[in-house]
Image: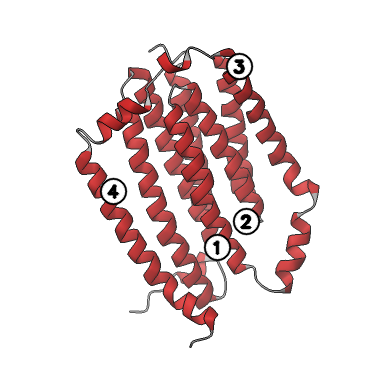
Amino acid sequence: MMEVLFYIAAFIALAATVLALTRSNAAHALIFLIVSLLAVAVIFFLLGAPFAAALEIVIYAGAIMVLFVFVIMMLNLGEAGEQREKQWLQPRSWLLPALLALILLVEMVTILATIDTQTSGIGVSPKEVGLQLFGPYVLAVEIASMLLLAALVGAYHLGRGFIDRSKGKR
Amino acid sequence: MAGLQIPLDHVLLLATLLFACGLAGLMSRRNIIFMLLSLEVMLNAAALAFVAAGAHWGQADGQVIFMLILAVAAAEVSVGLGLVLQVQRRLKSLDMDGADRMRG
């Protein structure tokens, strides 16, 4: 049962990744990549790592992909962009990703329906992860926070000129 | 190991295939947005391998490393997308072959 669900999710992840990286349109590629990340989240759930699955959806499919969407939208200003928006609303471009995501949803519901009481005993719980994270790995957490601070400063520096220009200051 | 009825080999194979897809995309595409997406795919494949190994041995370390990979991915994307905006402004295109010269 679990194996079958895993193989379906694995196939969806691979197919969505290949489709994402062979698109010519960046927005279509993003939709397929989000489906691929959702499939990987289902695999995490099947592996007994529900916390990692939640983080995969919240941070990867949520925050990071939204950043990509913002940048693509910023680069597509003007009338050509409007034409393209109309083209994006065609069902042809979102039907296949929607279908793949629907399969993943069915899988998720199946998992939740079949293993109702066992989940807490299976795999690695978030509590253990937290104890490890702030126990032996506390130095790595500090280094990650410094990395994120450096990335924040770097992104601000790179984006500052762009923001000034779009306001018409220079 | 109650959580893992799925063979570890197959998960690692999936991670390898995803990583190979990302690497092929990174080498074949010249659009900088697709190159960044390929990097994301590769990081995600590495994270999948870590979580699978952590689940196989029932240890939390795999998920801890997964979170660190998440932080690295977020940092990389924020700086990378800043660079995308700069490249678009200076070269008027997203083709990275236009940026093959450094101003010495």
Q: How far apart are marks 4 and 3 (CA)?
A: 37 Å
Amino acid carrying mark 3 in the image: Ala
Q: Is mark 2 on a helix, strand or loop?
A: helix
Q: Return the x and y of residue B31 as percentages of the image width and height.
A: 55, 60
Real-space Cα separation, disc 4 to disc 1, in angstroms: 24 Å
Q: Residue at x 45, y 38 (%)?
A: A55
Q: Can residue A23 be seen in this view?
A: no
Q: Which of A51 and B97 is in front in this view?
A: A51
Secondary structure at badge 1 equals helix
Residue at 44% over, 20% down = B9
The local secondary structure at tag 3 comes to helix
Quadrant occupied by the N terminus of chain A: top right
Disc 1 versus disc 2: distance between alpha carbons? Answer: 11 Å
- 1 vs 3, front mark: 3
Mark before the other along the chain sequence, 1 or 2 = 2
Labels 4 and 1: the sequence-earlier one: 1
Query: Are the residues tagged 1 and 3 within 8 Å (C-beta)?
Result: no
Residue bearing the label numbered 4: A144
Q: Mark 3 points at which residue?
A: A113
Query: Mark 2 highlights which residue?
Result: A26
Measure the C-alpha gap from mark 1 to mark 3.
Answer: 39 Å
